[in-house]
Amino acid sequence: MTFLFSYSLRNSYSIKVKFSNFAEYEGSSLSTFPFYIFLPPQLMLRRPRRNRKSPVIRALAEENTLSVNDLIFPLFLTAGEKKKVEIGSMPGIYRFSLDQMLEEIHSCMELGIKTFDVFPHIPDDLKDSYAKESYNPDGLYLKAIRTIKEQLPEACIMTDVAMDPYSSDGHDGLVKNGEILNDETLEILGKMALAQAQAGADILGPSDMMDGRVGYLRELLDEKGFTNVSIMSYTAKYASAFYVPFRDALDSAPKFGDKKTYQMNPANSREALIEAELDYQEGADFLMVKPALAYLDIIKLLNQNFDIPIAAYNVSGEYAMIKASAQRGWVDGERAMLECLMSMKRAGAKIILTYFAKEFALLSRK
Ligand code: PBG
């Protein structure tokens, strides 16, 4: 029995074993093995660690980057003056009265954040089943949008189009006999959207998940001369457990039932393609996936199938998870934040709506 060693082209060794006759082969333990035995690579031409050897090389090899240019900062608006009230389940995030919100927007703009998604906290006595307060031109929200655009015209303002903050039922649509009505809701959303566009909103964010709302809003806006107002559609918005801190912030939790007849089933991804196709056809400028972390595959799916920018909403519960564990010292909050935001970029989100926006901007200043 002789051993013949040889190198293969693909940088592994092979050994050939030669027997003088068949009986010798059969008698040896090698008879149970294939004739050629491949050993693990010994000669490594390709060493991926070389691209990780120093901060400079790592930066050169970096495939994705985070930038304040891609962030949208959600802000909570409340009535009154000089109010800045922290939300219990969202440390570092506040409900601002308008004067304080103007200051906040101003300081964020100095840090490079340019887009803000404003959500209103409406007192219970102004809520009704038709969400009429949502298009009251003298109401808290529309007045605030006008003032922000007057005083800080450079700020890009995104608004929320859905009934829940103004609805006595706490649902995103009109409720009749325990059912969420689709087409009747569109009319209300239309009035709300138009009022927001008139107040100066740059981007409208329909977050309600009614069928046909993007097309309905787009046609209405165009008809009224608002062809330049953008629509960032909540395209794949899932019925998620991660919205609870947001509903605390706005006191907007549903008064009965859940949102499963309009928000998507977390088990589904093909359905996201149907929603995306409709929103695209109906004229959406951006497609949003929400939440982000548990739905990175959906972000990737939409990014691979549609050529308009994809946004990810890094929602309140995702923020709360990191904050809560960081407060206990269980994770390094800063690193966890960066890693999560990067995962959304890597999945294919061009834009990230995140409560971490200011913290990230402050960090990247350092
Ligand atoms: C409702 C709306 C929700 C969020 C944004 N718009 C909550 C919901 O659908 O109940 C959640 C955002 C977050 O959790 O950060 N139209």
Image (cartoon, rainbow, N blue to C red):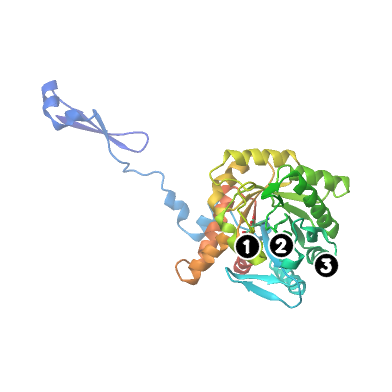
Looking at the image, residue 127 sits to the left or right of residue 264; the answer is right
Q: CA distance from mark 2 to mark 1?
A: 10 Å
Q: Residues within 10 Å of mark 3 (few under 14, many from 20)?
A: some
Q: Residue type at mark 1: give it.
A: Phe
User: Foreground: 333 or 314?
Assistant: 314
Which residue is found at the position 69% from the left and 51% from the top? 208
Contact check, label 2 and label 1, Cβ < 8 Å: yes
**Does the Cβ of the disc 2 residue fall within 8 Å of ligand 1?**
yes
| Image quadrant assignment for residue 342 | bottom right
**Does the Cβ of the disc 1 residue fall within 8 Å of ligand 1?**
yes
Q: Which residue is mark 2?
A: 119
Q: Residue type at mark 2: give it.
A: Phe
**Does the Cβ of the disc 3 residue fall within 8 Å of ligand 1?**
no
User: From the image, which quarter does the N terminus lie in?
Assistant: top left
Contact check, label 3 and label 1, Cβ < 8 Å: no
Q: Residues within 10 Å of mark 2 (few under 14, many from 20)?
A: many
Mark 3 or mark 2: name the one nearer the start of the chain.
Answer: 2
Q: Which residue is mark 3?
A: 147
Q: Which residue is mark 1?
A: 246
Looking at the image, residue 50 sits to the left or right of residue 112; the answer is left
User: From the image, which quarter does the C terminus lie in?
Assistant: bottom right
Q: Is residue 271 visible?
A: yes
Q: CA distance from mark 3 to mark 2?
A: 15 Å
Mark 2 or mark 1: name the one nearer the start of the chain.
Answer: 2
| Image quadrant, ligand 1 | bottom right
Q: Is residue 355 visible?
A: no
- The x and y percentages for residue 352 are 64, 55
Q: Residue furthest top?
A: 22
- The x and y percentages for residue 200 are 83, 59
User: Foreground: 100 or 14?
Assistant: 100
